[in-house]
Amino acid sequence: MAVSPVVTYDTTSNIKVTATKAKSLAVRTNSVSNPRNGSLPEPGKGQELAERLNDETKQRYVKDKKLGEGTYAIVYLGHLRADPSSLLAIKKIKVNTEYRDGLSMDAIREVKYLQELSHPNIIALHAVFSSKNQNLNLVLEYLPLGDLEMLIKDSEGIRYGTAEVKAWMGMLGRAVWFCHENFVLHRDIKPNNLLIAADGEVKLADFGLARSFSDPYRPMTYQVITRWYRPPELLFGARFYSGAVDVWSMGTVFAELILRSPFLAGNTDVHQLELICNTIGTPTEENWPGVSKLEGFLKYDKAATIPVRGREFYLSRFGTAGPVGVDLLMSMLALDPRKRCTARQVLEHKWWSSDPRPTAKEDLPKKGGGPERMGEDLKRKGGEIEGGRGDNVARKLNFGLAKS
Amino acid sequence: MSRAPVRNGAAPRRPGDEDDICPVCKSSRYLNPSMRFLVNPECYHKMCESCVDRIFSHGPAPCPVAGCARTLRKARFRRQTFEDLHIEREVDIRRRVAGVFNKREEEFESLRDWNNYLEEVENLTWNLLQGVEVKETEKKLDAYRRQNEAEIKQNAALESQEIADSEAQFAAQKEQARLRREAARNEELDERREKEEGRREIIDMMAKGDGDADAIARESQKVILKKSTARRTAAEKSRQQAAAKVDNGAAAAPLFSIQGLKRIPQSVPEKEYDPFGGYAIKPAYYYLRDHYEHSWLDNARSDAQITAGGYDVGEYCARAIMEASGGLGVFIEDEIEGREKRVEKEVGTASAAIASGGGGEGVDGDVL
């Protein structure tokens, strides 16, 4: 991707930086920090420059204990060699049986897009290096306080209200908006990909399914996004879609935060569609022009059509968000992706300025998920629901080793 | 202060009571053992209680002391605090002045201002004490009081609050000390009782006569030791808890005030919540039109298969233009130059400077 001319104005500090540019330069300086400085032990004169640079990067980090292991990746706790008090997560991607001759797509996507995006609500990728056997290692920001799913599920121990939901949604909204503004689709937004930093900041992680916005006539796969958070257009097999898919996921996460249970938890793709029809309304040519032209569109009995739910339905189920919050939720869960609000419109909504004011990040409820939880979260491959919460997911994985 | 020794059978003496004869009615303590003397802060002439009743019961009257003749009221008569009536008077005056001039050091910008203020107040006080320019001084005092009524009240409230605070803190400390003492006493009692019990047990066991006496003694000694350590840790814990409790109490009620804090904490108005988190993304080198005409895009705009999924040609156009202008504002030459300059400094040779400077002559020409 070219260096972005999109300029970020930090309105608080008056510093003018090109977000993506700063990041790419940072990564570059990481790897070419001191090429002429021969202070490091010369790792053999015959090596190529690339290998030497890789070795230099590798030298700067130390792996400590293992935090978790899946079939896709092993996550270690690590630190900078120069500063033992620094904490990092090192995600070592295993040489996969599926991709014996190269790297897995997930790893490439993750590196490609995380390197471009630098935002307080997106997990930071500090460096990338390869270790022996051509294993790819990603040096990631260390986020020790678990993820949002843990907080949602712990309805006994953790209590939160609208102000907290607003704070979390604000952070998620900023992350998604920043991705879309840089033309990146995340395509796997769900509570357990929203990790929590030590200061309470929520960070979007797992860019294993991310891609940039597609060119016209270039089809994309519709087998993305964990099913419960998947929008109807993907369930109908649309091959041309936009950032609206992420906004739907945000909407379902919003609903889940309020309900404290998954909003639309379908067992199969068809069941998921059924749930959407029953809960939100049946997609028809009237409320979604052109929907019947989509490849996977399923014909419904005209008589069984459920009209799109009105405001009263949402108010009765999500009343705690307040009438303004319900408006926002409804616009995020519009069936027709063209009518769904964009990530920018989400942040421009008046819900943010209405009462109550979002909780400060330091005051948000915390549940020490611990480093192990981060290990669990990072080792996962995109698009899957953890065992026990739903089977037959987008891509099934063996977690035999993980539960040790 | 020297006090008259307490005489047998009489009520405890207060300062001023040691005179035995009332200067007004000349009645003596011999005739009236419970005689008490009162003064009026108007003139500080001493007289006995019965004189005060007699002379002033029917309203204000002139002082009976020869050559005084100030009008006195009964309500203002009181017992004296100090033996020396001059001191009594000085303290009264100082109290009155301090009640009006009750500014506080933290209200002044510098120590010098504060000292100047104190000096001025002392001058006024001294004038009143010595009876110099009393009228003018009183006028000044009155004028100041009228001008700064609100402030005076506020500072007075602050002061009384401070006094209450320190008293409460003192009481809390006392309470804590009492608890500590009590705990220590209980502990000691417990220990003694347990020792006693242990000894009795040993004797009992020995009396039963099963086993070696030495072994029994050793075993029981161990048990006693264990018990006493357990008790000690428990006592330590409860002591800490008590201390924490007192601390918490102190924090809840304003028992102590921290010096150097502003009296009225300025509440900082909360900044408005920015949903964008301080970021604003705007294209810097181009502007985006709503619609870009291109025949290649027409189909993508009209084909239901493409549009129904939410695909937006506008987003593609935005990305295309962004990528086309990508790299603008990134000046690789400058970056390389900057890097080389750094290297130059490190190397520091003249030849390198000429080589990278692009010809030293040109630079000279510019300067000349």
Image (cartoon, rainbow, N blue to C red):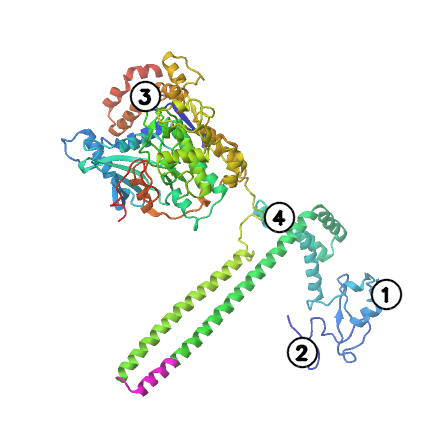
Q: Chain of mark 1?
A: B
Q: Chain of mark 3?
A: A
Disc 2 to disc 1, C-alpha distance: 35 Å
User: In the picture, which quadrant includes the N terminus of chain B?
Assistant: bottom right
Examine the image and state in which quarter residue B57 appears. bottom right
Judge whether residue A233 can be spotted in this image: yes
Give, as a three-letter code, the residue at label 4. Asn
Q: Residue at x 81, y 68 (%)?
A: B52
Labelled disc at residue B58: 1
Examine the image and state in which quarter residue A80 appears. top left
- Give the camera-side residue of B229 and A258: A258
Establish if A388 lies above or below B177.
Answer: above
Judge whether residue B272 can be spotted in this image: no
Give how far across and how far down residue B166 sits, in percent.
Answer: 57, 59
Q: Are marks 1 and 4 on the same chain?
A: yes
User: Which of labels 4 and 3 is toward the front?
Assistant: 3
User: Which of labels 3 and 2 is toward the front?
Assistant: 3
Q: Chain of mark 2?
A: B
Instruction: Indicate the secondary structure of the residue bearing disc 2.
Output: loop
Disc 1 to disc 4, C-alpha distance: 47 Å
Examine the image and state in which quarter residue A337 appears. top left
Disc 4 to disc 3, C-alpha distance: 85 Å
Does residue B199 show up magenta in the picture? yes
